[in-house]
Image: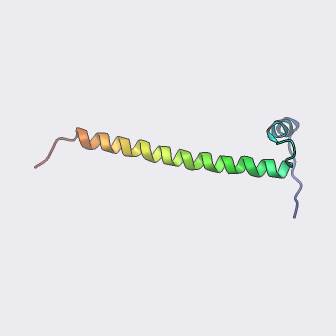
Amino acid sequence: MSKTIRLEDQVYTRLETFRGKRETFSEAVDRLLTMLEKVGELRDVLEGQAKFQEWKHEQIEKPATR
């Protein structure tokens, strides 16, 4: 099933530059969305790593309680 979408001229031109030689616009959008999802997953992992490093540093800096 296909749908019609409206793009501003400059957006169409940008999408056209990202599209492979034999790739449809639909395939290009799907590929770009997949990459965006992967970037989001990577961001989540990096944020988790940063929070872990902060926690680890806090644990090291805490005075030992007995």
**For the point 21% across and 41% down, which residue is it?**
62
Residue 58: x, y in percent?
29, 41
Quadrant location of the N terminus?
bottom right
Residue 40: x, y in percent?
59, 48
Residue situated in front as seen by the camera: 15 or 65:
15
Horizontal side of 44 relative to 61 (left or right) equals right
**For the point 67% across and 47% down, which residue is it?**
35
| Residue ranking furthest to the left | 66
Residue situated in front as seen by the camera: 20 or 66:
20
Q: Quick check: 2 above or below 56? A: below
**For the point 42% across and 42% down, which residue is it?**
50
Q: Report the colour scheme.
A: rainbow
Tally of numbered tags:
0
Residue 53: x, y in percent?
37, 42
Horizontal side of 57 relative to 26 (left or right) equals left
Q: Quick check: 18 above or below 2? A: above
Residue situated in front as seen by the camera: 10 or 21:
21
Residue situated in front as seen by the camera: 60 or 28:
28
Horizontal side of 35 relative to 46 (left or right) equals right
**For the point 76% across and 52% down, which residue is it?**
30
Residue 27: x, y in percent?
81, 51
| Residue ranking furthest to the front | 22
| Residue ranking furthest to the bottom | 1
